[in-house]
């Protein structure tokens, strides 16, 4: 990404009015969420067993992503995304008001606070996939990386502004006022969504049934090695990185003797670093590969984890938090952009929701892990252990690097010939067995079998539940590919909306080795009398 070309500028997506309005609404919502987090953590910081309780705020916020993450993606891929966002924001507003009222009334014990945090986190699970899957429809494909950087920039601007506002408000009006402002932030999102009148509903042309859509999203990720590698790389970074976010309140209160305002300042330093990182990331990307960039982010963050408990003053900690914010932003926005560019349109929200499950689930697990370690062993050993774990994760990139995807054709194509059937099957008919016969001479057999490994993954991630390749025992040089799809409707989705240009190349690599060309037939299940 270059800063010179308007189409590739970090700010270029803001020229689109709808994207700009939604981005600002999400920014306000994120500011409210960070205020909510600071308020919730500060409400618990003086409780008995504060290390565990404070870290559980992050866990309660992120556990819904593990429980309902894929559900959010299915809903976003199946229903009108604008209406879905409206309903969710209204519900979040109601929960936010109840939280504020009970807190002001002094009726907010830790268990109830964590319950409300869980409910608000559930709303976030339903919001993020719907919003992020809208972005590719609001900006052009060359600007998706810039849009991803802007999303990270918005999150980190909120990280600067939200804690700073929360610290001032807590000092002047109490935690209840912070929760009330967070509730008001949801209303801003509601007003923007009401003002937006899309020319066409942001709904898939052929909505899938919930259970089949849930299974299809899981199968896609399971059989897409590139997506799995992106997700595992995220976990290697996020689990140790969560130590900083979950235990930073204790760094502020115990090591530095600071109040809520001091904690907000530490979070602001992280946010400022992330904003700086967003502004320079385009130039860095032009010089570094994705793998080198992610490794550099991990090394920097590991150094910060060690430095933050070894530094002797608040000023030193504030300084080292700046590169931590830059590294965090670079890592998260890069992974997010790679996923948005790679995931095909039909499963984009589900793929992003599974990424959110990994993103927040890793941090939830890490928050519990580091909280349990910090309570008996203290902050210094805990942070040093997290730094070592982060360094080990960086070292694994030598053996499990990310694949280069820039040259892959991820556009949706319809290249399978329409089935020439003697009957008109009901869409619910099934299961369907698709049989393809290949004739491959012995000298091409090794290459053919290698190519069919890619075909296997292609079939399974686009809808097949079973796949097999067989050698014909009665006909020389003949191979039979069989795969099973649960219904005729599901198979028609493979034809119409689930294949990409890269998938076509995979299939053609195998088909070119067959002479004559492969022949396909369809077997539709029937029940005997």
Image (spheres, helix red, strand yellow):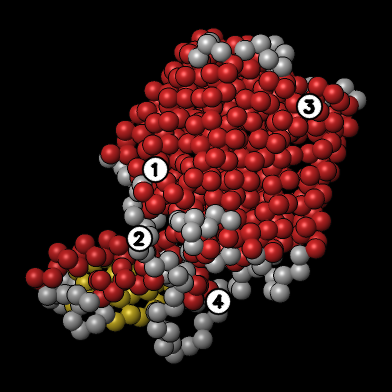
- Label placed on residue 153: none
- For residue 293, the mark is 1
Numbered mark located on residue 168 in the image: 3
Classify 10 Å Cα crowding around label 2: few (below 14), some (14-19), many (20 and above): many
Q: N-terminal of the two: label 1 or label 4?
A: 1
Mark 2 vs 3, N-terminal side:
3
Q: Separation of disc 3 and disc 1 at Cα?
A: 36 Å
Q: Residue furthest right?
A: 105
Under tag 3, what secondary structure? helix
| Residue 347, x across and y down, in percent | 52, 61
| CB contact under 8 Å: marks 2 and 1 | no
- Of labels 2 and 1, the one closer to you: 1
Q: Secondary structure at mark 4?
A: loop
**Label 3: few (<14), some (14–19) or many (≥20) C-alpha neighbours in 10 Å:** some
State which quadrant residue 294 falls in. Answer: top left
Return the residue at label 2: 457
**Cα separation between marks 1 and 4:** 47 Å
User: Would you identify the image quadrant in which residue 469 lies?
Assistant: bottom left
Query: The residue tagged with tag 2: helix, strand or loop?
Result: helix
In the rendered structure, which disc, 3 or 1, sits on the residue that comes first in sequence?
Answer: 3
Give coordinates of residue 100: x percent, y percent. 85, 33
Q: Is residue 37 left or right of residue 243?
A: right
User: Closest to the observer: 479 or 96?
Assistant: 96
Earlier-in-chain disc, 3 versus 4: 3
Specify the quadrant that holds the N terminus: bottom left
Residue under the point 38% across and 37% down: 296
Q: Nearer the viewer, mark 2 or mark 3?
A: 3
Task: Please give the name of the residue rendered at 67% of the width and 40% of the height, measured from the top-left corner.
Answer: 158
Is residue 485 left or right of 244 when viewed as pictured?
A: left
Q: Position of residue 492 (x, y in %)?
A: 49, 76
Where is mark 4, residue-wise?
427
């Amino acid at each position: 990404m270059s800063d010179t070309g308007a189409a590739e500028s970090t700010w270029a997506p803001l020229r689109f009015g709808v994207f700009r309005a939604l981005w600002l609404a999400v920014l306000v919502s994120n500011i409210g969420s960070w205020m909510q987090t600071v308020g919730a953590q500060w409400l618990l910081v003086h409780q008995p067993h504060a290390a565990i309780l404070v870290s559980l705020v992050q866990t309660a916020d992120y556990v819904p992503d593990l429980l309902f993450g894929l559900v959010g993606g299915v809903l976003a891929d199946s229903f009108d995304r604008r209406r879905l966002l409206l309903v969710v924001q209204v519900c979040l507003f109601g929960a936010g008001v109840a939280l504020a009222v009970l807190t002001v009334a002094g009726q907010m014990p830790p268990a109830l606070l964590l319950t409300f945090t869980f409910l608000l986190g559930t709303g976030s699970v339903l919001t993020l996939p719907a919003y992020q899957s809208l972005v590719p429809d609001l900006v052009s494909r060359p600007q998706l990386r810039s849009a991803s950087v802007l999303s990270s920039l918005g999150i980190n601007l909120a990280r600067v502004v939200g804690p700073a506002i929360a610290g001032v408000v807590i000092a002047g009006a109490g935690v209840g006022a912070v929760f009330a402002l967070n509730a008001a932030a949801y209303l801003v999102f509601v007003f923007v969504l009401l003002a937006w009148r899309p020319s066409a509903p942001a709904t898939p042309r052929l909505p899938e049934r919930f259970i089949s859509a849930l299974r299809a999203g899981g199968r896609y990720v399971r059989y897409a090695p590139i997506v799995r590698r992106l997700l595992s790389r995220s976990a290697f970074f996020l689990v140790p990185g969560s130590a900083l976010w979950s235990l930073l309140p204790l760094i502020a209160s115990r090591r530095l003797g600071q109040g809520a305002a001091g904690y907000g300042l530490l979070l602001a330093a992280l946010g400022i670093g992330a904003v700086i990182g967003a502004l320079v990331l385009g130039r860095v990307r032009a010089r570094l590969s994705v793998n080198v960039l992610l490794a550099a982010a991990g090394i920097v963050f590991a150094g910060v984890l060690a430095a933050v408990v070894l530094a002797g003053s608040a000023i030193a900690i504030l300084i080292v938090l700046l590169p931590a914010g830059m590294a965090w932003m670079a890592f998260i926005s890069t992974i997010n952009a790679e996923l948005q560019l790679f995931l095909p349109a039909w499963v984009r929200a589900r793929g992003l929701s599974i990424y959110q499950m990994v993103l927040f689930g890793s941090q939830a697990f890490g928050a519990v892990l580091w909280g349990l370690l910090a309570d008996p062993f203290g902050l210094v050993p805990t942070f040093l252990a997290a730094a070592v774990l982060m360094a080990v994760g960086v070292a694994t990139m030598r053996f499990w690097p990310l694949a280069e995807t820039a040259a892959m054709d991820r556009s949706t194509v319809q290249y399978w010939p329409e089935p020439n059937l003697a009957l008109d099957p009901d869409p619910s008919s099934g299961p369907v067995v698709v049989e393809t016969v290949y004739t491959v001479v012995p000298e091409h057999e090794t290459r053919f079998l290698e190519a069919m490994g890619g075909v296997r993954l292609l079939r399974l991630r686009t809808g097949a539940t079973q796949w097999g390749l067989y050698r014909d025992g009665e006909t020389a040089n003949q191979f039979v590919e069989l795969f099973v799809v649960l219904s005729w409707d599901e198979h028609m989705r493979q034809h119409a909306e689930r294949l990409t240009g890269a998938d076509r190349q995979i299939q053609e690599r195998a088909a070119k080795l067959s002479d004559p060309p492969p022949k396909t037939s369809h077997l539709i299940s029937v029940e005997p009398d």
